[in-house]
Amino acid sequence: MLFEKLSLNKPISLDSICLLLIIVIATAYITYGACMINGLVGNYDSNYDSNYKVTFFDFINGVAQIATALAFVLAWIQYRKNITQQRQLIIAAEARIQIDKMVVVIESIKVGNETNLTNIDQSITQLSNIATNFDELYSAMEEDIHKAIVRMQWQDMHFNHLRRIFSDIDPVEIIRSESSISDAELDLAVVDAQEESEKAIIPYKKYVFIQTLINHPIISPKFSLKDKFNSLDMFVVHFLNDKNLDCLFYGLMSHVDIRVCAPILAVAEPSQWALEKIPSR
């Protein structure tokens, strides 16, 4: 949750004063109403002192005062709504800032011939930290148009930036720079992996290629993606766990499959708990 530190320098807030005034006014008008009813009843009692009988003018005056009190109550309710709306705007603005930070980090990930394992590891660690802040802000928002806009911008980040970048990561360059495998051996393993990937359906071709390449008899004894990413599990929880992203994908038919969205991370084998529903989310 989003922890907001209370101001100890202002023990008596404006809300408390308004609530106290409403209670006092409501009590006064309830008392007035009871007296008026008692007076109306007295109008039909011959033994009732006429000096205390309620006139039509008293009745109209009482209604006017009650209307005034209700107007005050409505003003307080509107004040509370404005405060809530202001808070919502502040949180939404900060949530959008976090999304912009995510996009900046994602676009800094090197792909193609510049693919670098250290760069990927550092980037997903940064993204995991930013996502933690975003999730706290998002969960603190009430469901309205502002939250819907934040959700739309998060979807844009996920589909147009995150998925594209992780699809362009070249596992061959990672193996070449992180192992002592010769180019001839690597080329042979790549050919075998490409042949195997042709058997898979289009969405899983990249995943099958990387999995076959990493598990190839030539590659596996000298290189593995296991434990190469320090924040892999947290990254998966925040970005690639379909069970945890229902709210952020609200209104879409799309589902998140780590093998399609980030095949290289799927081959890195995140912990099983990272792919399960997190109770607090």
Image (spheres, rainbow, N blue to C red):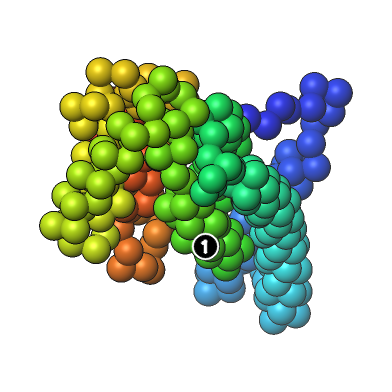
Circle 1 is placed at which residue position?
Answer: 160
Total labels drawn = 1
> From what the image shows, is residue 240 above or below residue 57?
above
Residue 204 left/right relative to 95:
left
Q: Residue at x 74, y 43 (%)?
A: 15
Q: Amino acid at mark 1?
A: Asn
Residue 217 left/right relative to 252:
left
Question: Can you tell which quarter of the image residue 170 is in?
Answer: top left
Where is residue 30 drawn, in percent x and y? 62, 56
Where is residue 108 drawn, in percent x and y? 64, 44
Question: Can you tell which quarter of the image residue 205 is in?
Answer: bottom left
Query: What residue occupies the far front of the structure in this picture?
Result: 184
Residue 122 left/right relative to 245:
right
Q: Residue at x 70, y 63 (%)?
A: 78
Residue 153 left/right relative to 190:
right
Instruction: Report whether residue 7 is seen.
Output: yes
Question: Can you tell which quarter of the image residue 221 is in?
Answer: top left
User: 247 or 115: which is nearer to us?
Assistant: 115
Q: Secondary structure at mark 1?
A: helix
User: 44 or 16: which is nearer to us?
Assistant: 16
Instruction: Report whether residue 88 is seen.
Output: no
> From what the image shows, is residue 200 above or below residue 67?
above
> From what the image shows, is residue 58 above or below residue 100?
below
Query: What residue occupies the far right of the structure in this picture?
Result: 9
Mark 1 nearby-residue class (10 Å; few <14, some 14–19, many ≥20): few
Where is residue 6 drawn, in percent x and y? 73, 27
Query: Which quadrant of the rendered structure holds the C terminus?
Result: top left
Q: Residue at x 79, y 27 (%)?
A: 7
Q: Residue at x 32, y 64 (%)?
A: 254
